[in-house]
Image (cartoon, grey):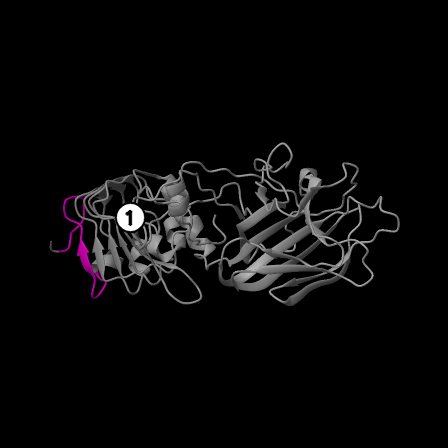
Amino acid sequence: MVDGTLWAVVNTTADYRRGSASYYEGVFLAQGKTMSFCVGANAHTDSDPFVSALEFIQLGDSVYNSTDFGSSALSLVARNSFGYGGAPIRFPDDQFDRFWEPFGEENSSKTSNNLTVSGFWNLPPLKVFETELTVPTSQPLELQWPPGPLPNASYYIALYFANGHDSVAGGSRIQNITVNGVPYYSNLNVTSDGAAVFTSKWPLIGLTKINLVPTSNSTLGPLINAGEAFQVLPLGRTTHPRDVIALENLKLGLHNYPIDWSGDPCFPQQYSWTGVTCSQGSRIRVVSLNLTSAGLSGTLSPYLANMTALTGIWLGNNGLYGPIPKLSSLKHLEILHLNDNQLDGPIPSSLGAISGLQELFLQNNNLTGQVPSSLLNKPGLNLKVNGNHLSSAQPPH
């Protein structure tokens, strides 16, 4: 079952021109044993959508745990090891195989190998604390980071610091942090134990400048070792779980169902499941199912009756077999087309209890028994049952 949908735009154009690979990372809460992933074209896409590799990694419970993953997800913008100039830091240095890209070799220096950093809930690798960006005492350190302009949104920002130069007698490293001139954190005392500061939602747009300014009682210049920035993406609305469960069970009984029947049936709206029409408003329900001549085979699950907002079902001209399930719970159903299949067994008399039923097409199946009087005597019903093995009087063709 899918509990949330997320839509993000990715652009591989610049990387393709440089002959480089593109990778995108998100942090989501898994609500079940499976997760769905969709790649779709948009108005800017000249080629078919594609993905070369997909990796799911389980994070520790503490990682990014200030985010409400019931309503949001995180999309990586930048993750950097400052003052570092080598290949991206990843597994085995990072137990979750996150990529820490090099950033800013100028104003960089090596730190002590005796750092005792601990207690970072996001669990950055120790290797990112082996280098730093720093400037001499009393001077501010200014970074344009993340390196590119950002869309107007909220961002999760985490910055990591560790003082590897405490051997200086009486040395202290105390700094104020601003983001685009707005105070972010004051009087941060950076020691060899390390420090991390974060915000779960910080509004940003365009280029971002981070300033580290030493306080008047700091004897050492400011420094920074690493940083992570994510765009906070609100989860979209979802289809009512009742309908999702029903469709998943319907799918289990079918063969040759549409290839796009995975994930949320109604979202993103432009990529809803083939044959599925959904309602608008705050409560999203499946209101019609149209797979006429879709090459289906298999049986109809009784779970179809749980999709109580359905007004129309069109499943004619397929290879469906087995009995017609009891559908009397579909109080809003107006049209039911099951014609030209291989359905067998009796016609459920309970269909006559659906007050608004206007069209019931059951012709050309293998149905047996009698046509229920509840259908023969139902006013305003267009009933077609010819081409079956029925024993009672039948309505006109």
Amino acid type, mark 1: Asp
- Name the residue rendered at 44%, 36% in the picture: 53
Residue drawn at the location 39% of the way across and 48% of the way down:
247
Pointer 1: what residue?
46
Q: Is residue 392 magenta?
A: yes
Quarter occupied by residue 341: top left
The structure residue drawn at horizontal position 37% and vertical position 50%, both measured from the top left corner, is: 304
Q: Is 76 positioned to the left or the right of 267 in the image?
A: right
Q: Residue furthest right?
A: 169
**Residue 392, placed above or below residue 140:** above
Q: Residue 351: x percent and y percent?
A: 30, 56
Count neighbours of disc 1 (C-alpha within 10 A) and say few if under 14, some if 14 to 19, many if 20 or more. few
Asked if 391 appears above or below 178 in the picture, the reply is above
Q: Secondary structure at mark 1?
A: loop
Relative side of 202 to 310, left or right: right
Q: Nearer the viewer, residue 88 or 233?
A: 88
- Magenta stretch? 377-395
Query: Vertically, is 322 above or below 362?
Result: above
User: Would you say the magenta stretch is mainly helix, strand or loop?
Assistant: loop
Instruction: Estimate the x, y position of residue 8 in percent, counting from the top left.
Output: 44, 53
Place residue 111 in its image quadrant.
Answer: top right
**Residue 340 visible (yes or no):** yes
Instruction: From the top left corner, tell me how far across and down residue 246 is, in percent.
Output: 41, 49
Q: Position of residue 12 (x, y in %)?
A: 40, 46
**Quarter assignment of residue 66:** bottom right
- Name the residue nearer the viewer: 169 or 284: 169
Does residue 282 appear left or right of residue 189 in this picture?
left
Is residue 38 visible in the rendered image? The answer is no
